[in-house]
């Protein structure tokens, strides 16, 4: 549920990732400054470096007071700023600059950064849930298995964009060996092989794949969305379902819901994961818990 706000956001911090997106950051800063100044707001800028950004940003936020903090970057920058604001009253704004921009799409935020700037003065504040995965922060989607592998390969490569993702996925698909997972929620248990297993606070990947239809970002629960190994002949149907909110229609998919979930991977002590678009390795068992309504975000007033 969105909370209407009457408080004016006067002093705003924009956390900019200099290497995300393909627009000039100098021009973006000028446009933000002009937009805010015309409306009697003060814009400040903070540039990420890629090294210890969370600690540095947290320290900066302890020393300076802002009415809102905007993440101007891709999913990694959004997750960084979200974690820095976690549990506090200062809301997160998003100016999407990345190739996926998953959370901003799930929140109905305009994908044109200039349009998204309107959130500085026309918005509602919406509290959303976040996840803790082995102590790590997650705001949107995380997964184990095939997609995590592709995200890691993509991250290591030089080329960006959907074309590079599809090329890597096609290369890896033929030799991919699915792992076996044991999933235990408060309500149920499931064990089996999975092509990929998504830990989903949200609904849709930045690629517009709807992995978790009908889910809510503020319902106090999250989902484990499993795609089991499938024959090549089933691939077109599964893909169609993923783009048409039909995740549950396939015999190779299932969803489990919970507030506290444990995932074991028999035979593995360390598994590759992607969290909010960033690859990482996690030790098993993987423990996932939800932090209900722990992050305040600015969304368009019409939602
Ligand atoms: N100044 C910097 N130089 C190099 N890397 C940086 C810098 N600032 C942040 N990073 C790195 O950028 C990554 C986050 O990128 P982000 O997700 O914001 O953009 P993106 O990768 O272009 O977007 P997308 O994931 O949607 O393609 C993190 O790994 C972070 O460490």
Image (tube, rainbow, N blue to C red):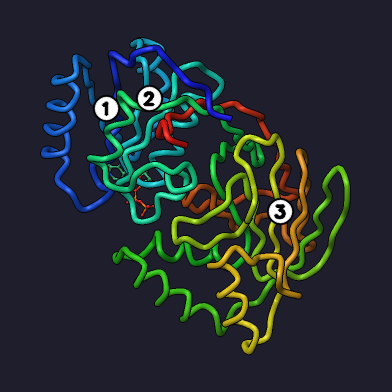
Q: Which mark is residue 224?
A: 3
Name the image quarter holding residue 211: bottom right
Q: Helix, strand, or loop for circle 2? A: helix
Neighbours of disc 2 within 10 Å: few (<14), some (14-19), many (20+)? many
User: Label 3 neighbourhood size at 10 Å, few (<14), some (14-19), many (20+)?
Assistant: many
Asked if the residues shown at circle 2 and circle 1 are in contact, with their CB atoms under 8 angstroms apart, the answer is yes
Among the 4 quarters of the image, the one containing residue 298: top left
Residue 104 rendering spot, x and y as whole percentages:
42, 43
Return the residue found at the far front. 302
In this view, 265 is above or below 139: below
Image x and y of residue 137, in percent: 56, 36
Q: Position of residue 259 (x, y in %)?
A: 76, 38
The residue that disc 1 covers is 46
Query: Which residue corresponds to the image point at 21% horizontal and 16% vertical from the top-left?
Result: 42
Q: Are marks 2 and 3 in contact (CB under 8 Å)?
A: no
Residue holding disc 2: 57
């Amino acid at each position: 549920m969105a909370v209407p706000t009457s408080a004016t956001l006067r002093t705003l911090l924009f956390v900019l990732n200099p290497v995300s997106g393909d627009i000039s950051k100098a021009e973006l800063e000028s446009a933000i400054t002009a937009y805010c100044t015309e409306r009697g707001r003060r814009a400040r800028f903070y540039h990420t470096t890629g090294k210890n950004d969370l600690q540095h940003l947290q320290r900066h936020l302890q020393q300076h007071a802002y009415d809102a903090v905007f993440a101007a970057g891709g999913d990694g920058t959004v997750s960084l700023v979200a974690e820095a604001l976690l549990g506090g009253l200062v809301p997160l704004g998003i100016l999407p600059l990345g190739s996926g921009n998953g959370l901003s799409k799930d929140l109905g935020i305009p994908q044109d950064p200039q349009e998204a700037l309107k959130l500085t003065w026309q918005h509602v504040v919406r509290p959303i849930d976040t996840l803790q995965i082995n102590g790590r922060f997650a705001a949107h989607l995380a997964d184990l298995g095939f997609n995590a592998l592709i995200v890691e390969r993509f991250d290591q490569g030089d080329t960006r964009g959907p074309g590079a993702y599809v090329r890597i996925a096609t290369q890896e698909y033929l030799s991919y060996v699915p792992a076996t997972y044991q999933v235990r929620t408060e309500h149920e248990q499931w064990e089996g092989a999975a092509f990929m297993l998504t830990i989903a606070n949200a609904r849709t990947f930045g690629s517009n794949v709807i992995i978790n239809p009908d889910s809510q970002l503020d319902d106090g629960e999250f989902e484990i969305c499993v795609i089991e190994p499938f024959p090549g002949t089933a691939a077109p149907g599964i893909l169609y379902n993923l783009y048409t909110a039909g995740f549950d229609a396939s015999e190779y998919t299932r969803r489990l819901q919970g507030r506290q979930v444990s995932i074991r991977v028999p035979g593995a002590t360390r598994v590759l994961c992607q969290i909010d678009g960033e690859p990482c390795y996690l030790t098993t068992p993987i423990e996932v818990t939800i932090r209900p309504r722990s992050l305040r975000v600015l969304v368009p007033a019409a939602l």
